[in-house]
Image (tube, rainbow, N blue to C red):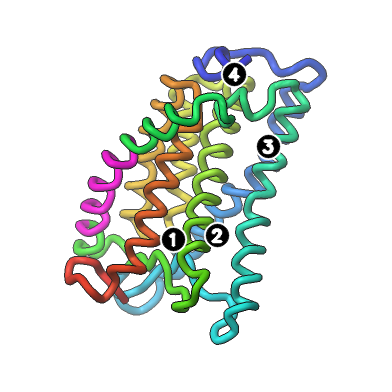
Amino acid sequence: MQAEAVGGSHPRPPAGLSVGLLRSETVLVLALSLGASAVSSLISFIGSLTRPGGLKDQAATLNGSYAPGRPWLDLAWQLFGIATALVPVALVAHLLIRERAGLGAIGFDRSRPWSDLGRGALVAAGIGSAGLAFYLLARAAGFNLTVVPESLPDVWWKYPVLVLSALQNSVVEEVIVVGYLLRRLDQLGWSPRASLAASAVLRGLYHLYQGVGGFVGNMVMGVVFVLLYRRWGRVGPLVAAHAFLDIVAFVGYGLLAGRVDWLPTP
């Protein structure tokens, strides 16, 4: 099953699951996760476009406080948000186990931890520098909001929560928008090019709240990630790469914001 799905051929739906059932299942999973985020992001972008002032004069905060001035309550909300965001991943795991595959079918397991981490680090190094340069150019050109990776209070749990948030983002996005979605689209008979386009455009859409630059940059990243997944047959390296990128972005912003001239702040 894994080789067929990753290779982009057209495997039949699992026994007992019709094409119609798989199609509705896929829509529901996306509606509960990144599909809903894409719609929310589109609405947010329309709001930013119609607000007085340019995009670069507005800010998109990724990790903010839920209870300012109440650190323990804030921590509870932060952990609650991270945990509930992972529920769709648990649902995907359940659905894959139902077809006697499991998350190992998409390469999200502990069978190759060092290979996944090594590949992920190399991918992150290549994408990270190019992504930062593209963001700075897009913002300077007025196509992007000022992205604020974190605005948490200066408390003891700030950086652990940022790392957990980065890990949650990476697991949710790569498991759902790459591993699960491509597997289902393969089973539904989509061509590899159509599946690549769907995955990449979806990734761009749920980052549209950041602006046109966020949409284009993440769509390009989506294309790269799909191609790597097709080559390696594993989302493990992609989860690692995404985690490295977000950890550096979140923690780096917290350490450098206001201390270096080249990093935009609101």
Q: For the residue marked with disc 2, what is the amino acid?
A: Ser
Q: Is 41 or 167 nearer to us in this picture?
A: 167
Q: Is 72 or 61 nearer to us in this picture?
A: 72
Mark 2 surroundings: few (<14), some (14-19) or many (≥20) residues within 10 A: some
| Residue at 54% over, 83% down | 68
Mark 3 surroundings: few (<14), some (14-19) or many (≥20) residues within 10 A: many
Q: For the residue marked with disc 1, what is the amino acid?
A: Tyr
- Part of the protein shown in magenta: 123-137
Taking the image as shown, residue 225 lies to the left or right of residue 24, namely left
Q: Quadrant of the N terminus?
A: top right
Q: Quadrant of the C terminus?
A: bottom left
The dominant secondary structure in magenta is: helix
Query: Is 200 placed above or below 209 here?
Result: above
Query: Is 194 placed above or below 60 here?
Result: above
The reply to whether callout 1 and callout 4 are in contact (CB within 8 Å) is no
Closer to the N terminus: mark 1 or mark 4?
4
Residue 159 place in picture, x, y as percent: 46, 65
The residue that mark 4 highlights is 189
The residue that mark 2 highlights is 40
Label 2 to label 1: alpha-carbon separation = 8 Å
Closer to the N terminus: mark 4 or mark 3?
3
Q: Secondary structure at mark 4?
A: loop
The residue that mark 3 highlights is 92
The reply to whether callout 2 and callout 3 are in contact (CB within 8 Å) is no
The reply to whether callout 4 and callout 2 are in contact (CB within 8 Å) is no
